[in-house]
Amino acid sequence: MAAQKTSIAVPTPNQIADAAVSLGRVLDGEQVLGLSRYLELLLVWNQRMNLVGPQDWHTILADLIADSWHLADFLNSLNLPEAPCTVDLGAGAGLPGLPLRLFWPHGVYHLVEIRRKRTAFLLQVLSAMQLQRTFVRPQRAEQALPALAPVDLCLSRAFLPWPELLKLVKPWLARGAAVVIMANEPVPSVMPPDWVATGSHRYTGSDKDRYFWSLVPANISR
């Protein structure tokens, strides 16, 4: 007997808007529509491959997507160029990048992901969401970074341990560029040599406190 497919509970736009309000965020119509398209495709693809684990849409919104609007607020507080070149390494399921672009549309945004199935997912969702100046790069970070340099902003969610990430990206950063780390602990009091913490933010997720750190190299010659 053929296995039955598990039914997917896809939220309506109104449900998404109401859930966001319960999480402390009022969404405009474009943001609701974009998140609706993102969640629908994420839930479908998540049945084919493990993108975010066996979670319902409300948990995904509260635990993963909400990070993106908090991150947008943090990025707006940083001293970045008006139209920065942003690189999102190990984009995976498009978090935080795809929802982030609904709340922070500045500059050009590159989602770097080498895994083919995840790249296919990102391309389909990007087309459905109709995000502007947002691109998928099916490359390793070591290939994408020199091609995109100088980079003004680098984001990472668990792509590499952050000290290793800093070593990887530093040669390709513009002068004054920032690396933003999404973490579960406060910014360390001691930074690696030639790096300075220029900002941090704490917010409460559905289960615990979460943090963003903004790190800037002390010496960039570009």
Image: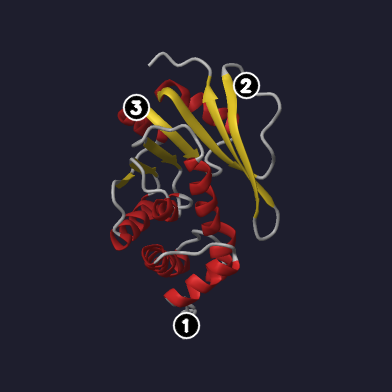
Residue receiving disc 1: 4
Asked if residue 10 shows in the view, the reply is: no
Q: CA distance from mark 2 to mark 3?
A: 22 Å
The residue closer to the viewer here, 213 or 147, is: 213
The quadrant holding residue 62 is: bottom right
Type of the residue with mark 3: Ala
Residue found 43% across the figure and 53% down from its top: 103
Q: Which residue is mark 3?
A: 149
Amino acid found under the numbered disc labelled 1: Gln
State how many labels appear: 3
Q: Identify whether 186 is placed above or below 1.
A: above
Camera-near label (1 vs 2) is: 2
Q: Which class describes the residues within 10 Å of circle 1: few (<14), some (14-19), or many (20+)?
A: few
Residue at image coords 53%, 43%: 74
For the C terminus, which image quadrant? top left
Q: How is the image coloured?
A: secondary structure
Hey, which quadrant is residue 19 in on the image? bottom right
Q: Decide which of tag 2 and tag 3 comes sooner along the chain.
A: 3
Query: Mark 3 falls on what kind of element?
Result: loop
Q: Is residue 34 above or below residue 145?
A: below
